[in-house]
Image (spheres, rainbow, N blue to C red):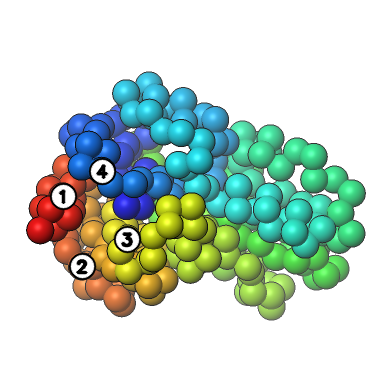
Amino acid sequence: MLLDLLGVVYDGDTPITGAAAAIERLRNAGLLLRFVSNTTRSPRGAVIAQLAAMSIKVADEELLTPARAAVEWLRKHGRQPHLLVHPDLEVEFSGLEGGSGHAVVVGDAGEAFDHASLNRAFRELVAGADFVALAINRTFRDADGLLSLDTGAFVAALEFASGRSPVVLGKPSRDFFLSALAGLNSPPVDAVMVGDDAESDVAGALSAGLGAALLVRTGKYRAGDETRFDPAPTALVDDLAAAADWIISRAAA
């Protein structure tokens, strides 16, 4: 099972009702879990600590984020990052100096997105730097309960201005989903994704070959999301607790 975090397990610092118990039930049912988050504001340690404060214990190897995938990509290609990310995330990219070339790495920079920072990234791209997007989500549910612009809007601006297409390392990248399954000895067809984003979580997972993908009505979900993207969700459920019921009942069949 692959589980999204923001909008499925918690909203901001608030756990979603029943999520911790649902995760415990899934573990007790013998299901192998991976937490696949497109968060690009918080380093991995902070995410794991946040979950622990909600009584959800997640091991380091169970959490996959775009930042980890980006560090692996940069090392593999010998690139030094030009970061357009949230200041809290910069620590994830330490020790990557001295590459043979540059790569612009774009995540959710929050208030650090301004004309000056975007223009610096644009000029790097024009000069020939590689273009790496940690995610291309359109929106996320912000701390005030309303939708806010996510990374995808700023990636699209840089893509339009530079005429360059990015390498996308987070959801809905097929490689991201397959990387999450790599250590589980599980073919994609035997895996289930649970998310609140019908495009990146659900359609992305099904396009990557996963056997099922459930869309929850929590987080960023808006009425009708289940019909807006193709492939459509395998099922629409109220929350992670209901998703656990759906999955456990079929696993036992």
* Res 239 seen here: no
Is residue 209 shown above or below 22? below
Distance of mark 1 from mark 2, alpha carbons? 15 Å
Question: Mark 1 or 2, which is nearer the eye?
Answer: 1
Q: Amino acid at mark 3?
A: Ala
> Residue 243: horizontal and vertical position, in percent?
18, 50
Residue at numbered disc 1: 248
Residue at numbered disc 4: 30
Question: Mark 2 or 4, which is nearer the eye?
Answer: 4
Is residue 110 shown above or below 115? above
Q: As rendered, which of 240 and 119 lies closer to the eye?
A: 240
Q: Earlier in the sequence, mark 4 or mark 1?
A: 4
Q: Secondary structure at mark 4?
A: loop
Residue 106 image-quadrant placement? bottom right
Q: How crowded is the residue under tag 1: few (<14 C-alpha within 10 Å), some, or many (20+)?
A: some
Q: Secondary structure at mark 2?
A: loop
Q: Earlier in the sequence, mark 3 or mark 1?
A: 3
Distance of mark 3 from mark 4, alpha carbons? 13 Å
143 left or right of 129 in image: left
Distance of mark 3 from mark 1, alpha carbons? 13 Å
Q: Which mark is residue 234?
A: 2
Q: Amino acid at mark 1?
A: Ile
Pointer 4 with pointer 1, Cβ within 8 A: no
Distance of mark 2 from mark 3, alpha carbons? 12 Å
The C terminus appears in which quarter of the rendering?
A: bottom left
Q: Amino acid at mark 4?
A: Gly
Distance of mark 4 from mark 1, alpha carbons? 10 Å
Q: Which mark is residue 185?
A: none
Is residue 242 shown above or below 51? below
